[in-house]
Image (cartoon, grey):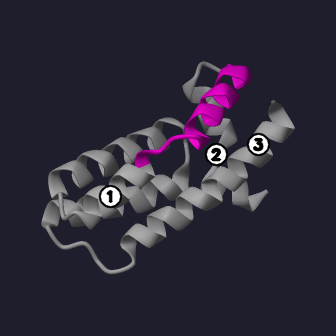
Amino acid sequence: MADEVIYVDFGEGVKRVMNNAKLYVKLLTKFKNDTRLDDLAAALGAANLEQAKSEAHKIKGLAANLSLTELYKQSLELETQIKAGAVEPGQLETVQAAFTQTVQEIEKVIAQNG
């Protein structure tokens, strides 16, 4: 399915955990309950760019490690904008939308492989 590669690259993700699909599904389950996105939004809302940069970096790292491709791409872009001190209007919302879509895909992956 094309969506899986855009949001969750299952094959690549399983490879990253030494072909342990059960562990990968467990990590995805843990990720979908993550609240870092709320922390990121709060930091940006408070204009705390250091904390926002840190939260964006954490989300980017988790997305990369779990092969969550679109979320990785969008959080990388947001982190880059925060570092530059100029977050484009709508970029946080783009990351939030990618997160929401990623969680929906994660739920499908868990249902198919859990």
The location of residue 114, given as percent across then percent down, is 81, 30
Q: Is residue 30 magenta?
A: yes
The location of residue 110, given as percent across then percent down, is 77, 38
Label ID, residue 42: 1
What residue range appears in magenta?
20-36
Q: What amino acid type is highlighted by mark number 1?
A: Ala
For label 2, count other residues whose C-alpha is less than 10 Å away and answer few (under 14), some (14-19) or many (20+): many
Reply above or below: 11 against 8: above
Of mark 3 and mark 1, the one earlier in the sequence is 1
Q: What amino acid type is highlighted by mark number 3?
A: Val
Q: In the drawing, does residue 28 fall left or right of residue 87? A: right
The location of residue 58, given as percent across then percent down, is 35, 41
Residue at the spot x=27%, y=56% of the render? 43
Residue named by callout 3: 109
Q: Is residue 52 magenta?
A: no
Residue named by callout 2: 9
**Secondary-structure class at tag 3:** helix
Residue at the spot x=24%, y=66% of the render? 81
- Overall secondary structure of the magenta section: helix
- Whether residue 37 is visible to the viewer of this picture, yes or no, is yes
Q: What amino acid type is highlighted by mark number 2?
A: Asp
